[in-house]
Amino acid sequence: MRLILRGFAALFVLFLVSNLAQAQFGIIQQGIDATTGKKSGTGNVADEKTGGKGYAAPQTFTNAEHGFSYTVPAGWRLQGGDPSGNDPVFMKPGTTMSFQFHFTAMTPDFPAGASVAASLKQSQQEIKTGKYSEAKRRDDGDYKKKCGVIGWEVTETPSGGGGSHQRIIWQCYNGRNFYFNFMVAAHPDQFEAAKTELRTALDSIKFCR
């Protein structure tokens, strides 16, 4: 009976974190629309006239609370939020490229391991539907030390994000049952050309360092 309940919990969480990811992108996208004066659906371009130029050199930020760091490439800039806290958004002026993350606390008895397994399995099935081109397990650091994470990563197809954006998303949990959502994105027309730079930002994230 306990296994059945944990299974239902994992499925519920799969639904929950999927909607959190969609809501996060939608809310932040609306904010970028308001800042840049662009309309959704066409791929928003960060404007130097509105927000200024990007960093002259790569910038590394650290979140001391959760023990992770990341590096934003040269040419990017902070669009909004706290780079050492929660909900920062970075964009590269003149492009639709963006990098952002969010984290939230789950309940102490939340089945993180079961959630990762169920979510990865579901994402791998969605490769067949054309939503994702890739879905894989992605852990980092030592989960047992509570600063490491267990999780999964997905890459959307050009149509997987609804046609307005294409993303690589890393979702994970730490040993204190915090849920993290890291994502990089670009308009599908720019995604392939931007993929190496987007991947550089996403892969710079390090836990337990």
Image (spheres, rainbow, N blue to C red):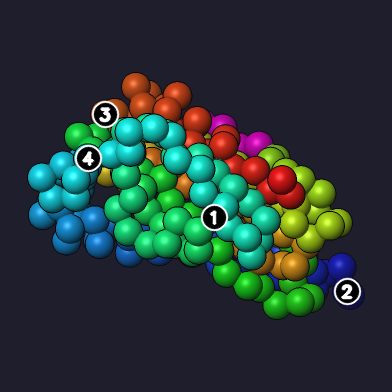
The tag on residue 189 is 3
The residue nearer to you, when weighing 32 against 74, is: 74
How much space separates mark 1 and mark 2, taking CA atoms? Answer: 28 Å
Mark 1 or mark 2: whose residue is earlier in sequence: 2
Rendered location of residue 144, percent (x, y): 86, 56
Task: For label 2, count other residues whose C-alpha is less than 10 Å away and answer few (under 14), some (14-19) or many (20+).
Answer: few
Residue type at the position of mark 3? Asp
Task: For label 4, count other residues whose C-alpha is less than 10 Å away and answer few (under 14), some (14-19) or many (20+).
Answer: some
Q: Residue at x 80, y 53 (%)?
A: 143
Mark 4 or mark 1: whose residue is earlier in sequence: 4
Nearer mark to the viewer, of 2 and 3? 3
Q: Is residue 59 above or below residue 200?
A: below
Nearer mark to the viewer, of 4 and 1? 4
Q: Which residue lies under the disc numbered 2?
A: 2
Mark 2 or mark 3: whose residue is earlier in sequence: 2
Which secondary structure, mark 3?
helix
